[in-house]
Structures are given as C-alpha cells and as structure tokens.
Image (tube, rainbow, N blue to C red):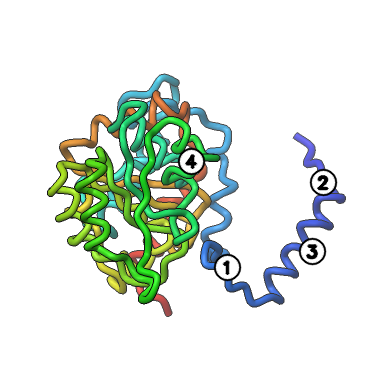
Amino acid sequence: MREIMDHELEKILEKEQNRQKNSAVFIASENYASESFRKYTSSILTNKYAEGYPGARYYAGCEYVDQIENLAIERGKNIFGSNHINVQPHSGSQANMAAYISLLSPGDKILSLSLDHGGHLSHGHNVNFSGKIYEIHNYFLDKDSEMIDFDALQKVADTVRPKLIICGFSAYSRKIDFKKFKKIAESVEALLMADIAHIAGLVVAKQHPSPVNIADIITSTTHKTLRGPRGGIAIISESLAKKYDRGIFPAVQGGPIMNNVLAKAVAFKEASQKSL
C-alpha cells in the first residue's frame, strides 16, 4: 500500500517537536516519553480489536494481544507490589468512572477534596458526570497550613456518612497520609479510593508513600510521572477486582486500545529500571 504523506500536518508536527525540544515545561501533568518507548504507541496493534479480557475475548486472533496484556498486567503488579491491576482504562477519568459504576449506585454519597482546594473534576464537580450522578460532599484544606485538616475531615465524614471517600488530587503538593484516610473511611464504613495520577511515578520509585494494601481501589494515569502512554490503570483489592473489571468492560468501555496496552507494558518495564 502506498504511503501517503500529509505535508500540512508534518509541518505542524515539526513545529510542536521544536517547541518541546527548545522549551522548559513545568506542567506537572506532562512528561517526556523516551524515544525507544514512543515507537510502541504507533505499533501494528492499532489494527486489533480485543473486547474482553485475556482468555475471554469476543474477537478471533487475540492470542498475541492476550500475551501482551498479560505481560502488562504482570509488570504493573510488579512495580506497584499489588495483586490485581487493570490496564485497560483509556484514561484516568474513565478509570475513576469505572470505580463509581462498579462500586456505587446513583445517588450514593462521595466525599472528596473540593476542586478549588486541589481536587479533580472527576471527583464530583457539578460540571462532570460524577457530580451529576452521585451526591457529592467536599472536604477542604486548612486555611492557615494549606494542608488537609483530618479533624475537620472526620467531622464531615461522621455527618455525611459517605459510601466512598476519595484521596489523591490534581493540585496538592504535600505527601498524602493514606493510613489516616483509611482510618476515617473505616470509621464510617466507607470505601477508600486513592487517585494517584500525579504521583504514581513517585510511588513506584518509593519517594512517596504507597496506598497499595491500604486503599480499596487505586486509579492512575500512565502518562504523567510514570512517563508512559496517555491512558489509565486501576489497582484493586482482590475482593473488589471482579466488580471493577466488569465496571471497565462492559460497563464503561468496549475494546481496549491495544497499542496503548503494549506501550503501558513498555512503560512499566522502564519504570522498574534505574535511570542512568
């Protein structure tokens, strides 16, 4: 098949490449993927549909994508030290959506950090799906220390009695005490979800405490501090794993983006190695 060059787009892409090469970017949610990694995001797997999970697909010809997804799963479990990981979420927000869909009912109460104090849209803001389907309550930072006020959080949790408490944020630069969050969640019989999209690489590198074996469900993106493809993952306690997997497929998504699943496997391997 003859290769078609799109010169108009090539010129724009070259300009963006120069912008990235010659700029110092301090956007916390961006990173620079390695050259060896980037080729995998455009692999031949972009041609392959693979609805379902390894060993239980709805399409023929999935023997090799099964091997790739299983490898991504094992590598993900290895770097996080977890027993179960789902590598299919297309994004962090969809990983969060699957958590809500699989663990909650419409109208259930969620307690999360207010967006203007460092929370995230998908944690219940009223313009987001999460704020339209669930009853959202917020906790806030202490106005003087600008840190999480756990005493105030406990009082709100006691009053609201949420079904789910969310920790992990989009604009909070302090270490997160997952154990304190878990203690509060248990005191009101709530599930605890940790969204570590911004700190996943720090968790893997053991530069930030890990929520694994503390939170009931952990969601993350793979393109920020993990330096992988644009996408999401979820680490789930074994008791909730089957529910969550059904929350991704068939509840929220159809087929996984297999070239990105491959790229996640590569990123997890890179994350397991010491930088030069």
Picture residue at 58% right of the left edge, 54% below the top: 39
Please report whichever mark, 3 or 1, sits nearer to the chain's N-terminal start.
3
In three-dimensional space, the C-alpha distance between marks 1 and 2, rounded to whole angstroms, equals 32 Å
Residue 96 left/right relative to 80: right
Q: Nearer the viewer, mark 1 or mark 4?
A: 1
Q: Nearer the viewer, mark 3 or mark 1?
A: 1
The crowding category of the residue bearing disc 3, from other C-alpha atoms within 10 Å (few below 14, some 14 to 19, many at least 20), is few
In this picture, is 181 found above or below 72? below
Q: Nearer the viewer, mark 2 or mark 3?
A: 3
Amino acid residing under circle 2 = Met
Residue with the mark numbered 4: 90
Amino acid residing under circle 3 = Lys
Helix, strand or loop status at disc 4 = loop
Residue with the mark numbered 2: 5
In three-dimensional space, the C-alpha distance between marks 2 and 3, rounded to whole angstroms, equals 17 Å
Furthest toward the bottom, the residue is 276
Picture residue at 16% right of the left edge, 37% below the top: 239
Please report whichever mark, 1 or 2, sits nearer to the chain's N-terminal start.
2
Residue with the mark numbered 3: 15
Q: Position of residue 26 (x, y in %)?
A: 58, 73
Q: Which corner quadrant of the image does residue 151 belong to?
A: bottom left
Residue with the mark numbered 1: 27
Residue 262 left/right relative to 75: right
Q: Nearer the viewer, residue 19 or 141?
A: 141
Helix, strand or loop status at disc 1 = loop
Q: Nearer the viewer, mark 4 or mark 2?
A: 4
